[in-house]
Amino acid sequence: MKGYSLLIVDDEAQMRELISMYAEREGYRCTEAEDGQQALELLAKRTFDVIILDVMMPKLDGLSFCKKVRETSDIPIIFVTARGGEVDRVTGLKIGADDYLVKPFSPRELLARIEALLRRVRPSTVVSEELERYGALEIDTKGHEARINGTELSLTLKEFDLLTCLARHPGQVLDRERLLEMVWGYDYYGNARTVDTHVKTLRMKLGEHAGLIQTVWGVGYKFEVTA
């Protein structure tokens, strides 16, 4: 399932990180949102192959989000929620969910359900965007290129991967250890300050758009989309 993109929508950061960790090990590209409103904003900019969705969230809950998505899209949706009653499951499926998994759950079971769902819907409805836009930044995943206002950035492989990783988690603080795992891999034993070095170089190459990557002192970094 390498290359398929998942949108993980849950107000619990630990749950998002757990799902992302297991999914990325299997080659999925993961983007996280902490509520339905943020997820809608992401969907307005790009498409995803599967949405993993919690029910109880602030601003815009999972059921309302699912209804809005179904007005315009048939993208596969899997509810992952603590609400496991029969009425809850039936309601979720009736408003448009393709599957329903109750917390606590096995990450491996979730991945198996995602894979089974993709087998059912591809190739007719699964179309991943190869071009991702985040304000002035444009990322071409197929060509492995990044551009600012149409001008290509000269990036190394790791710089490209790091920039892409940050951009896919807008507004979310990612600490150095997690960035190392996501970009360099779980078998990397180098110093976490490697991230700082790459961020410094990335900012230099981004020039006047260096502010896309924000430092959260004592924690890590976050990506802030600008116009």
Image: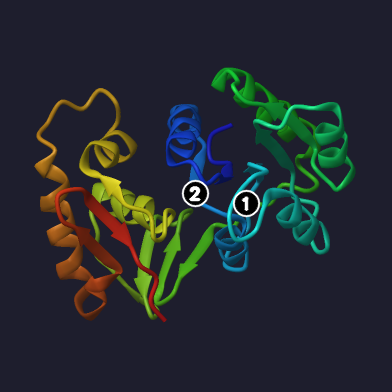
Residue 45 in percent (x, y) is at 57, 67
Residue 186 in percent (x, y) is at 29, 26
On-image quarter of the N terminus: top right
Q: Amino acid at mark 2?
A: Thr
Residue 217 in percent (x, y) is at 15, 56
- Nearer the camera: disc 2 or disc 1: 2
State the residue in front, 142 or 17.
17
Q: Mark 1 Cα within 10 Å, few/some/many (few <14, many 20+)?
A: many
Q: Amino acid at mark 1?
A: Phe
Q: Residue at x 29, y 31 (%)?
A: 185
Label 2 with label 1: CB-CB less than 8 Å: yes
Vertical arrangement, residue 152 with respect to residue 37, above or below: below
Residue 204 in percent (x, y) is at 14, 69
| Element type where label 1 sits in the image | loop
On-image quarter of the C terminus: bottom left
Vertical arrangement, residue 59 with respect to residue 148, above or below: above
Q: Which mark is residue 206?
A: none
**Residue identified by numbered label 1:** 48
Q: Residue at x 18, y 66 (%)?
A: 203
Which is nearer the N-term, disc 2 or disc 1? 2
**Residue identified by numbered label 2:** 31
